[in-house]
Amino acid sequence: MSARFTNKTVLVTGAGSGLGRAIALAFAAEGAKVVVSGRRAAPLDETVSLIEAAGGTAAAVTADVARAEDLGHLVSRTVALFGSLDVAVNNAGIFRGGASAADFPLEDWQALLDTNVTGVLHSLQAEVAHMRAHGGGAIVNISSNLGPHVRIPGVFGYQVSKAAVSALTRAAARDHIAEGVRINAVSPGASESSMSLLPGETEADREVRMKEQSPLGRVTAASEVAAAVLYLASEDAGSVVGTDLVIDGGVSA
C-alpha cells in the first residue's frame, strides 16, 4: 500500500457506514489522519475502531450537513484535532424514491434538497473557507449515476438532487481552482451499500439483478469507489478539475 496521504488530514461526511466508511478506511490505510462525521455517534465510533484496529488514526465528530452551523463547527474541530484540513469528501446523503414527479411527496423533496444539495453546499462552503486561507486542498463530492448520467422511472427526487450535486461541483470547481482548491465528483452506480438495495431485496437478490442490468454483470465494490475518490484527492490528479467520474459498470455508457 502506498502512503499518498501521510501527514494529510481528511474529512469524510456520512462515514458511519457504506461508501463513507470504505472511503475513510482507504484514506487511513494510505497514511491520512481521518475525521469521520455523521448524525449518529455509534456508527462513527465503529468506523474509528476499524481504522484504529488497522493501525490508522481517526476521530469522530457528529454533525448534520443540513445545518450550516454544524459544518462550521465540524471544520473547526477537524483542524483542532489534527492541525489541518487537506482533503474533504462530501458523502452524506439520503434516498427517497417510489413516486413519479407529479406524485412526489413534498416532504421527501425537501428532505432530499436539504441533505443532498444544500448539505453539500454547507460542507463545501465551510471547507473552502478554511482551505483557501491555508494553501488550498482537494474536495470530492459523492454524486450518483442516477440523475446526472442516467434516469429511471420512480426515482424522481433523488435523481434531481444528484444532478444538482454534479452541476454544483462543476460550477464550484471553476470558482475556486484559482484559490488552490480542486473540486471534483464521483458518481457511483449500484455499489456495496444498503442504498442500492431495493425494498425487501437481499444482497444475493441484488447480485442476480445486476447480472441483467449492468454490462459489467455485478455491483461496484465499495473499494473501487474509494479508489476513485483517493485518486481525485491525490496529487496524481493535480490537473483534474470539475470532473464527474462515473463508476457504474457501464450502465450509463
Image (spheres, helix red, strand yellow):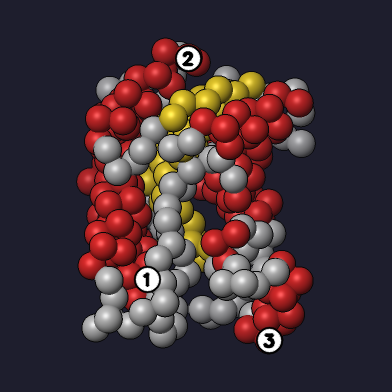
Q: What residue is at 51 percent from the left and 47 percent from the top?
A: 232
Disc number at residue 207? Answer: none
Name the mark on residue 81.
Answer: 2
Name the side, left or right, on which 173 lies relative to 245: left
Secondary structure beneath disc 3? Answer: helix
| Secondary structure beneath label 2 | helix
Is mark 2 in CB contact (under 8 Å) with mark 1? no
Around disc 3, counting alpha carbons within 10 Å, would you say few (fewer than 14), some (14 to 19), or many (20 or more)?
few
**Residue, x 34% and y 76% (percent of image)?**
156
Amino acid found under the numbered disc labelled 3: Glu
Q: Amino acid at mark 2?
A: Leu
Q: Is residue 221 left or right of residue 87?
A: right
Residue for badge 1: 159
The reply to whether dot 1 and dot 3 touch (C-beta < 8 Å) is no
**What is the spatial separation of the Cα atoms under label 2 and label 1, in whole angstroms?**
36 Å
Number of numbered markers = 3
Q: Tell me residue 202's x, y (percent).
A: 70, 69
Residue 158 visible to the viewer: yes
Residue 212, disc:
3
Above or below for 238 versus 247:
above
Give the spatial CA distance, label 1 vs label 3: 22 Å
Locate residue 250, reporting x and y percent: 60, 77
